[in-house]
């Protein structure tokens, strides 16, 4: 009986480093994922700043306005942000789309009004 326990202890001792390594790998992956999420958020915000600057220089440029709406869509669906902040981005992107459509300057293949409305509806339901 005692020999059996020694065998179990020996096996547990041998498996412990592997289990610890596996746990450590999982923890590192979580840190990496958080870092990637933070980097994506920073990138989206920088992209929005650049697009806003371009739009400010040439406010009639439809493509740059659409690009601002795209940045708003990315930030508005970023799960890390608070719901109110996401809502603000989605509303802004929606308004840009609606303004362009009202001016008859929104190309049909760039009309994402329904998409923005659906994301806002989902956000409000949560």
Image: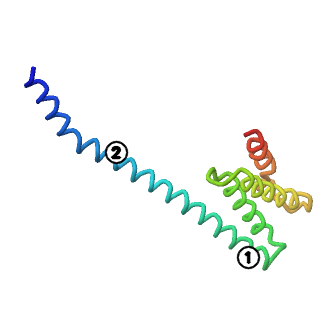
Where residue 50 sits: x, y (%)? 68, 73
Classed neighbour count for the residue bearing mark 2: other residues with Cα under 10 Å, few (<14), some (14–19), many (≥20): few
Which of the two labelled residues, at mark 2 and mark 1, occupies the earlier sequence position?
2
Instruction: From the viewer's perspective, tell me whether residue 62 is left or right of residue 10.
Output: right
Say which of marks 2 and 1 sits in front. 2
Circle 1: element type: helix
**Which residue is denoted by mark 2 in the rendering?**
23
| Residue visible at 65% across and 54% down in the picture | 81
Q: Are marks 2 and 1 in contact (CB under 8 Å)?
A: no
> As displayed, is residue 56 above or below residue 120?
below
In this rendered view, identify the residue nearer to me: 44 or 18: 18
| Residue visible at 84% across and 73% down in the picture | 60
In this rendered view, identify the residue nearer to me: 87 or 98: 87
> As displayed, is residue 52 above or below residue 75?
below
Instruction: From the viewer's perspective, tell me whether residue 24 is left or right of residue 71.
Output: left
| Residue visible at 76% across and 54% down in the picture | 90
Mark sitting on residue 53: 1
In this rendered view, identify the residue nearer to me: 26 or 109: 26
Where residue 104 sits: x, y (%)? 90, 60
């Amino acid at each position: 009986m005692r020999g059996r326990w020694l065998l179990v202890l020996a096996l547990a001792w041998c498996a412990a480093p592997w289990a610890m390594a596996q746990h450590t790998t999982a923890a590192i992956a979580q840190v990496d994922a958080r870092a990637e999420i933070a980097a994506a958020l920073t990138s989206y915000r920088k992209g929005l700043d650049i697009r806003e600057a371009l739009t400010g220089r040439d406010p009639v440029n439809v493509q740059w306005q659409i690009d601002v709406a795209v940045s708003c869509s990315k930030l508005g669906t970023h799960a890390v942000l608070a719901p109110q902040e996401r809502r603000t981005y989605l509303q802004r992107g929606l308004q840009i789309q609606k303004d362009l459509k009202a001016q008859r300057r929104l190309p049909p293949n760039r009309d994402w009004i329904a998409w923005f409305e659906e994301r806002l509806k989902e956000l409000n339901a949560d």
